[in-house]
Amino acid sequence: MEAILEAQPKFLNSNNNSLLILSVKKTFKVLLISLFIDVLANLLEACKDQNGSRIIQQYFEKADREEKERIFQQIIAHGYSLMADMFGNYVIQKILELGTIQQKLKIYEIMKGKIFMLSQHTYSCRVIQKALEVGICLRKNCASPLPNRNSRITDQYKMKC
C-alpha cells in the first residue's frame, strides 16, 4: 500500500502543495483500508481460488506488518484445510516465507501431531517442505525456529513429496 501512496502526479510535487499531498494520501489510504476490509470478508474463498490465491500472495508480499497480521488472523482459523487445498497451500507457504516468527509458530502448532498425515497429501506436503526450508522446527516438543538455516539441517529433514 505504501508504494501506491508514494506515486504522485507531477503537479503535486511542489512544496506549496504539501498539505494537499498529505490530505490526498490520507484519503487514499482510508479508501484502500476500506477495500481491504471488504476483501477480508471473502478471504477464505479467495485463498481457494487460483487467481484469488495469487492476489493474496502478492498482497501479502507488499503489505505492511498490520495488514499482514489482518490477513493472517483471517486465514489461521482455516489453516489446516488451506494446507491441503490446491491453491490455499500457496498462501500458507507465503506466510511461512514472509510472516513473523509468531505467525510461523502458529502454523507449526496447526501442523503439530499431524505431520505424517500432512506429508502424505499432495498439497500439504509442500507446506511442510516450506516450513523446513524457512527453518521452522517440526520435531517433537520443538516450538521454536531452528537456530540457523544451514542447508544440511533442512536437507536432513526434508520429505519427498
Image (cartoon, rainbow, N blue to C red):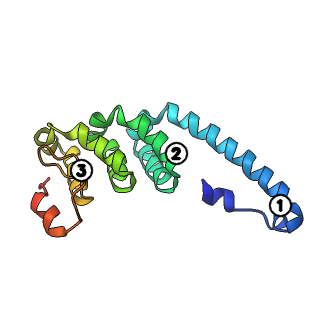
- Tell me which residue sits at (21%, 49%) in the image: 128
Along the polypeptide, which appears first: circle 1 or circle 3?
1
Name the kind of residue labelled 1 in the image.
Ser
- Tell me which residue sits at (27%, 41%) in the image: 83
Residue 64 in percent (x, y) is at: 53, 52
Quadrant in the picture for residue 31: top right
Query: Does residue 61 appear left or right of residue 90 in this picture?
Result: right
- Tell me which residue sits at (46%, 56%) in the image: 61
- Tell me which residue sits at (67%, 56%) in the image: 5
Question: Disc 1 vs disc 3: Cβ atoms closer than 8 Å?
Answer: no
Residue 129 in percent (x, y) is at: 20, 54
Along the polypeptide, which appears first: circle 2 or circle 3?
2
135, above or below 35, in the image: below
The mark found on residue 144 in the picture is 3
Callout 1 secondary element: helix
Q: Nearer the viewer, mark 2 or mark 3?
A: 3
Question: Disc 2 vs disc 3: Cβ atoms closer than 8 Å?
Answer: no
Q: Tell me, yes or no, if residue 59 can be seen here.
A: yes
Which residue is denoted by mark 1 in the rendering?
Answer: 18
Which residue is denoted by mark 2 in the rendering?
Answer: 67
Q: Residues within 10 Å of mark 2 (few under 14, many from 20)?
A: some
111, above or below 10, in the image: above
Query: Does residue 86 appear left or right of residue 20 in this picture?
Result: left
Q: Residues within 10 Å of mark 1 (few under 14, many from 20)?
A: few
Q: Tell me, yes or no, if residue 86 can be seen here.
A: no
Residue 148 in percent (x, y) is at: 23, 65
Name the kind of residue labelled 3 in the image.
Ser
Q: Residues within 10 Å of mark 3 (few under 14, many from 20)?
A: some
Q: Nearer the viewer, mark 1 or mark 3?
A: 3
Residue 107 or 10: which is nearer the viewer?
Answer: 107
Name the kind of residue labelled 2 in the image.
Glu
How far apart are the alpha carbons under marks 1 and 3?
Answer: 46 Å
